Image (cartoon, rainbow, N blue to C red):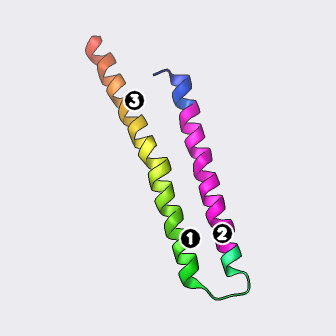
Amino acid sequence: MKKKSIGVTVGGLILASAVIWGAVIVGCSFALKGTECYNEIQNILIGGVGAHLILIWGPMGVLFKKIKESKTEENIKE
């Protein structure tokens, strides 16, 4: 894997993370508009955390594992 493509991938994941949390915050603000609805907000936040873990940290973990393995292979070849 090339360093440039890894940087682009990590950057894309970071942007996706920001979009997810932006949507969570907007969703919470709509749910809070003029009401006291903790249960709705709690569900939105739990959904945001779940989406963040699955869609962002899962792929990033796989990517970091590939980077570590490629560095290990390079060290063995030397």
Position of residue 5 relative to residue 55, above or below, is above
Tag 2 near tag 3, CB within 8 Å: no
Q: What's the amino acid at mark 3? A: Ile
**Secondary structure under the numbered disc 2 in the rendered image:** helix
In the image: residue 78, left or right of residue 58:
left
Which residue range is magenta in the image?
8-29
Mark 3 → mark 1, Cα distance in angstroms: 34 Å
- Estimate how packed mark 1 is, as few (under 14), some (14 to 19) or many (20 or more) residues with alpha carbons within 10 Å: some
Position of residue 41 relative to residue 8, above or below, is below
- Residue 25 occupies quadrant: bottom right
Residue 36 circle label: none
Which residue does the numbered mark 1 point to in the structure image? 44
- Residue 34 occupies quadrant: bottom right
Q: What's the amino acid at mark 2? A: Gly
Q: What's the amino acid at mark 1? A: Ile
Q: Tell me what residue is drawn at x 42 percent, y 47 percent.
A: 58
Which residue does the numbered mark 2 point to in the structure image? 27
